[in-house]
Amino acid sequence: MSDDFEKAVLINFNYGGNINPQLKEQAAAYIASIKQSSDCWKLCCERFPATLYPEVKFWCLQTLHEVICACYLQLDEGSRQMIKGALLTWLQRDCTSESPALPPFLRNKLAQAIVAVVKREYPALWPSFFRELVAAAGSGPGLADMFGRIMVAVDEDVISLDIPRSAEETKLSMHLKDSMREQCIAEVAAAWFNLTQLYKASRPELAAFVLASAARYVHWMDIGLVANDRFIPLLGELMDHANPVLRGAATDVLAEVVSKRMEPTAKIALVQQLKVVDACERLSSNLIAAAGANKAAAAAALAVGECGEKAKQGGGAAGGGGAGVSAAALDQDDELLGKYAKLLATLASEVMDALKRVENVVISFNVTGLGVDDDAARDATLAAQAANRLLEALTRAALTAFCSGLDTISMPLVPFMSAYVARLRALTKRGQALPAGAQMHIQAVLEGVAAAARYPADGANEADDGSGGPGLGAAAAAAAGSRARLSDAEMLAAREEQWEVEERRRELLVLLKNAAKLAFPEALNFVAGKLQAVLAAGQAAAAGSSGQLPGSGSGAGSSGASFQDAEIAVTLLYELGEGAPDDALKPGSGGLGQLVLLLLTQGQALPAGQHRLVALAVLETCVRYCRVLQQEQSAIPAVLNLFVGPKGLGHPSPDVATRACYLLSRLVKTLRSNLKPYMDEMLRQLQPYLVVVATQPPPQGPAVGTAREASGKNLAPVTALVDDRLYVFESVGLLLGQEELPAEQQLAALHSLLQPLQRQIEGNLQQAAAEAGAGRGSGSSSSSGCAGLAQLGSGSWAILQAMEAIARLNKGFKWELCTRNRPQLGAAFLQCLEVSLAVPKALPGSKQLRARFIAFLHRMVESLMATVLPYLPAALEALMAREADVTDMTDVLTLLVQLITRFKEALGKLVEVVLPIAVARVHGLLGADWDWSGRLASPAAMAAAGQQSPQQQQQQVAVTLEDAREKGELQRGYYGLLHCVVHNNLAGSLLQASPQVLDSMLTALAKGASTHTDPAVRRVCVQVFVRLLQEWCVANGSELIPGFKSFAVQQLGGQALLGLFGSSSAAAASSNGSCPASQQLGPLDARDAATVALLGEMASALKLLQEKCGDAFSVHLCGQVLPESRLPGELQQQLAYHVRESEAKQLKEFLRELLLSAACASK
């Protein structure tokens, strides 16, 4: 059996794929059968010492751990002792010997199994465990290692509350900590000290591991066990140790000691006792030196790597690889630097928090008028003075380290910097004097932000000078062709780096803005110095190399300043504008406005201005400060040249060119009237870009914008096929749509833009139809962005682009201008609408084209108003073609609702024609067996179906979940359309429908009002009924449709009322047996706001029925409805009374009480 057992375990642990799957299944079944035995733990105890296979040993430990966790306390005393004895034997025998050494994964599993026993026996059954463990730890390095592993396992498996635990596990964690405090934590702390002292020279990694386990316990143990005259000097000594891992472990322990929660005066005393503040300045200087060394080492490693790569590409041996600095060494150094920075930040933050709490105590006493005795006041004063001295020294050290420019050092210090700036702002608000040197500190904060927010030198964006691909127009293509394009891998690396930098900048830029709010003049001077320095460097480089092509280099060697310098200077200027004082942008006197003008007018001299990131930053900054251009219009030409030149729309990078299209629209929207003198030249310069955008698809692949883009722009619908380049058409529309322009010039310019787009639509219809027939060009409703564009054929894409371009142009024209003042403009757009009508007719199956046409029609309605009415019948007829499916018809209903809401009675004739068609199409798509209660499309039904097995899902006779959801949306849209018709004075249009259509419509309304699971849908149906009662039942008692009163009494006054209590007979009829019993209707929830609103509508409807139908309704209510409701007789009489005599509000409250009673009875 043993041989078979080992073979089965080895097969089970073989993941190489070279084992027969059937054999592996048999092995797994065999192992599972062994585990099911109640004595399987005996096999584990027997096989662990006997086997030579680590896999078998691991399985034994794993199975023992499972047995201990599942049923250890249910075993008899002898069995428990055997398990515990075996574990301790293996601990002392197998973990002491180093030849052969037990692998780390087995050591960890053994520690986990031992801790599982401790969890169940300590302290009641095994009170001496930790003392025994401490005694064994001194027997050699193997047991010292196991001491650390067991202490780590105790923390992870029992104590730590960072891991989610149940209430019982949390209680056990607290109990174990309390027991350790009382019995053994002092001995454990002494063991940490002794083992670290013992192995710091001979086995520094082991000493570091012991300290790492100690760091887990510091936050809840007595701080005096670590913060004492023995442990603290040892930690200080180890921070200068040659081994970086040991230095890091000592740093972590000190950080835990400092961050331990305690009273503020005790915290200040503790920091003083540690005597590490005096070393902080030395530590910060070491951090700066280490940061410089790391940067140099990284550069050397990069150079060695590049040389090796070139040697490999050239066929020679790389050689000399050992001369470089290994990546592992650099990562290890970075980790250590981060720990140093974390310690420094923790020290400074804790001291500042303690100072704040001491100050708040004194302030609260003063505010409340309570007296403070002399001793308390003296203690608080002394504590505050000591904390101020500590904070001053720590702040200097932290600021020095913060300015290192190394992320590993700077980022851990950001929370302290933010808290420090917040403290200074609070002192300013209270009218207190700032600490000495506060202005210098603010300057250092700004320097640190600028250094930490820079793009890394020699990073992935270093070579990304904008040659990422073709932008817009011939100029961009020429610029891209003059330089080697980045490979796809290089472009991806550059964008990944961009995402990382923008994520890192979030907190840094918030810190910058808070510092600027505290000292805006200092922040402005700092940013001005940065910007002026890079502009001066750019001008000097241009003067020294006048023969060099502009933008031919982006590094410091070619332009005097790197792209990192230029980008961070412009970014700081951009961020400074958020929350800046109002007078900062005033013409003449505003310093920020003057600085912006400097960038706008001399931006051409900006170093690395062609770099993708620099170009993006400049464009964003221009738009943020466009108010300056309103005041200083002389700078407008320079800005316009920037946008339409090779650093904007003509940039080789599609990121910049596309973003420039959007930013130009924002600029034009703000400066619209100020741009009239430049309009002709702008249109001439934009013409090539318009042609490119309209006729050439955007580059494939995900477009990567900036964080500002992600946070500042709304996402378009998934069917919109977003192409942000189309914003350039919106800009042109804003320019042309101004009433002050000469009419002839305006009309001629508009025709010159619209006619090519019309021809593009007409000329591509045949090709798009052919693509649709071949399986391309229809588009998927779930596609978006460039991914959706890639699924379209070229003909379909050209039509989509042309229609959207026309719609964007149209946004700049107000409806009064197109319909009243200059109807020729409206006629030009109507011609485009007439041309576009052919699109849904020729391509009825294309969802993307349908969606674009509907959006196009909406746009035309907004700008052309009633002049589009003659075109609506043809448009709706095309949209309701037989090819339209459920989702298509839902879109049509939504469009009809919006059109009716806009035009009201003017759409009466169209509604008379279209509504019967729409009703027939809806009922045809839903089918005769559709469940009008909406239960199939409810979230509960979908969740229940999702819990079924795939086999059960395949056996469902009803529609799929997605079909049900889509049909449910169509049903809601159908009710919404009827609601819109009757509430816009078009109820008379329903009278023109055939009896069959009316019967279908009223039956659907009745089922919705009585059975739908959503109270909001029921309310809509009831509102339609109420309006029809008011319209069709006239004052003299006659009715426009014979039998409508009787129908309303039976359905609205009967089934809808019964449906409130879940006893409507229509519920069973509507479900057709397709819903399980668990989903049958019950009483509505009277606590739900939607139900309360429904009750209000039902109360009004019942009162209206009583008014319109009189005794007929009363007889039906008392004779049929109330007996069927199964309400007690007394409540039936009260309900009948309220319907006859009470106000609607009182009836509503009574209905609500009935629902609450019914809900309680159902429970």
Image (tube, helix red, strand yellow):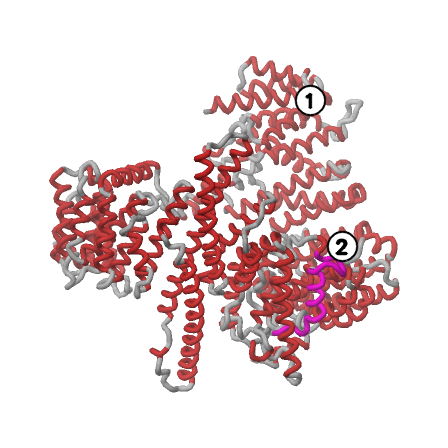
Task: Give left or right: position of 632 versus 242.
Answer: right
In the rendered image, which quarter contains the C terminus? top left
In the image, what residue occupies the spot 62% across and 27% down?
Answer: 1095
What's under tag 2, amino acid-wise?
A: Met
In the rendered structure, the answer to whether residue 630 lies left or right of residue 264 reads: right
User: Is the residue marked by circle 2 packed among few (<14), some (14-19), or many (20+) residues within 10 Å?
Assistant: many
Q: Secondary structure at mark 2?
A: helix
The label shown at residue 242 is none
In this picture, is 9 found above or below 656? above
Magenta segment boundaries in residue numbering: 584-607
The residue under the point 80% across, 41% down is 905
Relative image position of residue 701 (x, y in whole percent): 55, 67
Query: Gap between marks 1 and 2, in whole Å?
Result: 44 Å
Q: Residue at x 49, y 40 (%)?
A: 941
Q: Is residue 327 left or right of residue 687?
A: left
Q: Nearer the viewer, residue 312 or 578?
A: 578
In magenta segment, residue 871 = no
- Residue type, numbered disc 1: Lys
Please state which of residues 237 and 60 is positioned toward the viewer in this rendering: 237
Magenta run includes residue 593: yes
* Residue underneath mark 1: 1103
The relative height of residue 377 versus residue 113 in the rendered view (above or below) is above
Q: Identify the mark nearer the N-term, 1 or 2.
A: 2
- Inspect this view and state whether residue 151 appears: yes
Q: Which residue is denoted by mark 2 in the rendering?
A: 860
Q: Where does residue 115 sit, x and y in percent of width and height?
A: 23, 46
Q: Measuring from the top left, give residue 1022's x and y in whole percent.
A: 65, 31
Q: Position of residue 37 (x, y in %)?
A: 17, 45
